[in-house]
Amino acid sequence: MFRAGRSAAVAALAAAALALGACGGSSDGSGDGGGSAEGRTLTLWHYETGNSAMGTAWAQAIKDFEASHPGVTVKFEEKGFEQIQKTASMVLNSDEAPDIMEYNKGNATAGQLSKQGLLTDLSEEAVKRGWDKLLSPSLQTTARYDERGIMGSGKWFGVPNYGEYVMVYYNKDMFEKAGVKVPTTFDEFTAALDAFAKKGTTPIATAGAEYPAQQLFYLLALNKAERAWIDSFELYKGKVDFHGPEFTYAAQTFSDWVKKGYVGKDSAGMKAEDMGVAFIGGKYPIMVSGSWWFGRLREEIKDFEWGSFLWPGRFAPGSSGNIWVVPEKSGNKDLAYDFIDITMKKEIQNLLGNSGGVPVAADPAAITDERNKELIENFNRLSTQDGLAFYPDWPAPGYYDVLVAGVQELINGSKKPEEVLDEIAQPYDDNLADIAE
């Protein structure tokens, strides 16, 4: 994977930060205070597409917010996930920070920003507004961070208002044509992959240049994992052996799947959007990815029947969804809190559920679509069996790029599985040593 030199990378990030901040947050100095709302602007960033479940719900939340706050305008700016991921620290440390922003949860992202003092402590608001009652303890894991930036305890620095998990989407028409039944066990799943490969069809749509392939790699590790291993890896509650059975199985199996044609070698350069578009276009029978795709698939797939099922194993990547954070430099914190409150109301949560999302505070009776009900029920089932395993890039700052590079090497065959494990172990161990100091 090509990596720019340090000076070039810094220059590129600085340019991106300037571009992100060109239409930055309000400068009216309102802060936490009340006063007249007349002429105030709430600058809001998120990266949900307009036809996704979250995009649909947040658009309605903006309308409801403006209706309940006469004189206040919401200035919404859609940003890319990668864009915010790479530049958030720089932007939030400038005077161009938005008032409220959707951000990725976990140690490496929200935890890192909280440790740097860039996010507002929401603990008091969480109690005052009842968010702590609406969110179960497991969903609160990604909202709270300690002084080290480790999730699961400490102060509230974000508020999640939906759930998410990685599942298997499948093309029912392609399954039927190939005579493949929906698998219920991992052995049946691999048999299905083999059946497609023998017919000359690459079964799994994935993307090595972004998150999907590393999540598939993590799923394979989870098939050999117990909860104690997950807590050690994600929460630093124990020592992780990168050459133990979990990661060894994941690296070797992923490499084997490429050789067997279950994963295409061309996927090393594909991005998540490429993967999704290819599946929507009927080019692959299977896409292993998150519930965040559900609403878009429902909206855009017209030429074939499709469905979804849980990954055949006890665990899957998943947690609360991304979180609303309020930058410390927000000029309109009171308005930001009000907006978060609106996204937690039953009306918005019900809309989220009926649009293909996984709400955390909806009325179950209000969810009318059977496929949407199944999506939510599968999340609840996974959550109830303690099957939410967070995400592989969360433990350490910059670990997302480390995993992208490592999995690309597995796809390209440029490094042996054991070499890739050495490569992904070093940054993790370095970060663990920094935390221990």
Image (cartoon, rainbow, N blue to C red):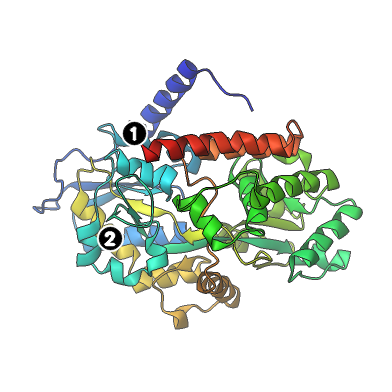
Q: Amino acid at mark 2?
A: Phe
For image coordinates 31% across by 41% down, the residue present is 115
Report whether 265 appears left or right of 90: right
Q: Amino acid at mark 1?
A: Val
Residue topped by disc 1: 91
Q: For the point 22% across and 54% down, which residue is it?
A: 335
- Secondary element type, mark 2: helix
State the residue at coordinates (36%, 35%): 89
Q: Please identify the residue farthest to the right as the structure is shown.
A: 199
Foreground tag (1 vs 2): 1
Residue 366, picture quadrant:
bottom left
Q: Secondary structure at mark 1?
A: helix
Residue 276 visible (yes or no)? no
Specify the quadrant of the image occupied by residue 229: bottom right
Q: Quadrant of the N terminus?
A: top right
Q: Which mark is residue 65?
A: 2
Give the x, y percent position of residue 343: 34, 63
Q: Is residue 129 visible?
A: yes
On residue 359, which mark appears?
Answer: none
Quick one: label 1, few (<14), some, or many (20+) residues within 10 Å? many
> In this rendering, is residue 300 above or below 106?
below
